[in-house]
Amino acid sequence: MLSGRCHCGAIHYVATGEAAHHALCHCEDCRRSAGAPMVGWIAFRTEQVTISGDPVTYASSEHGRRLFCGTCGTGLFYTNPVALPGIIDIQSCTLDDPESVAPGAHIQVAERLAWMADLASLPEFARYPGM
């Protein structure tokens, strides 16, 4: 069982059973929606996920629906009954323990930002380095 929530705690969820996949998506739609260079998605059958609270739904494409917390704005779920029938994708970094399931693939890499290829070569700081 995996559980998670939005930033403010207004929406909680529980997913049971095995995930269908866990991938890091690099598509422009995900980047713009999250304001991040990629988004982790862990997919479950719809009936495996119980949601407490009332997420807001945004039609991000003809069939794609992004669900988020209307209070704090945290992106939580993605559904697309045409491309992913019976599947709900959960933004994996909203899990209570996001390290519990490592991603297994990068997807939509045709749209990946070029500078993402060299991230491992950037300097690292344990905390904010200051000015």
Image (spheres, rainbow, N blue to C red):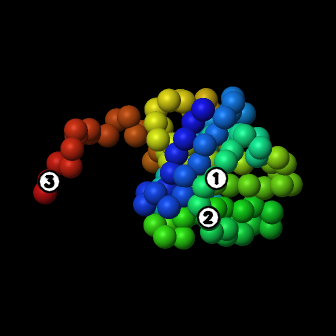
Q: Identify which residue, 72 or 63, lies in the foreground.
A: 72
* Quarter residue 127 falls in: top left
Residue 100 in the image: state x and y as whole percent.
50, 29
Answer yes or no: is residue 55 visible: yes
Check if mark 2's residue and mark 1's residue have beta carbons within 8 Å: yes
Q: Which residue is mark 2?
A: 55
Q: Tell me the SS state at disc 1.
A: strand
Q: What is the distance, in whole Å, between disc 2 and disc 3 at their CAs?
A: 37 Å
Residue 15 in the image: state x and y as whole percent.
64, 39
Q: Tell me the SS state at disc 3.
A: loop
Q: What is the distance, in whole Å, between disc 2 and disc 1 at their CAs?
A: 9 Å
Q: Which residue is mark 3?
A: 130
Residue in the image at 60% along x and 43% along y: 14
Q: Tell me the SS state at disc 2.
A: loop
Using the image, tell me which numbered label, if any, was put on residue 51: 1
Residue in the image at 40% along x and 40% along y: 119
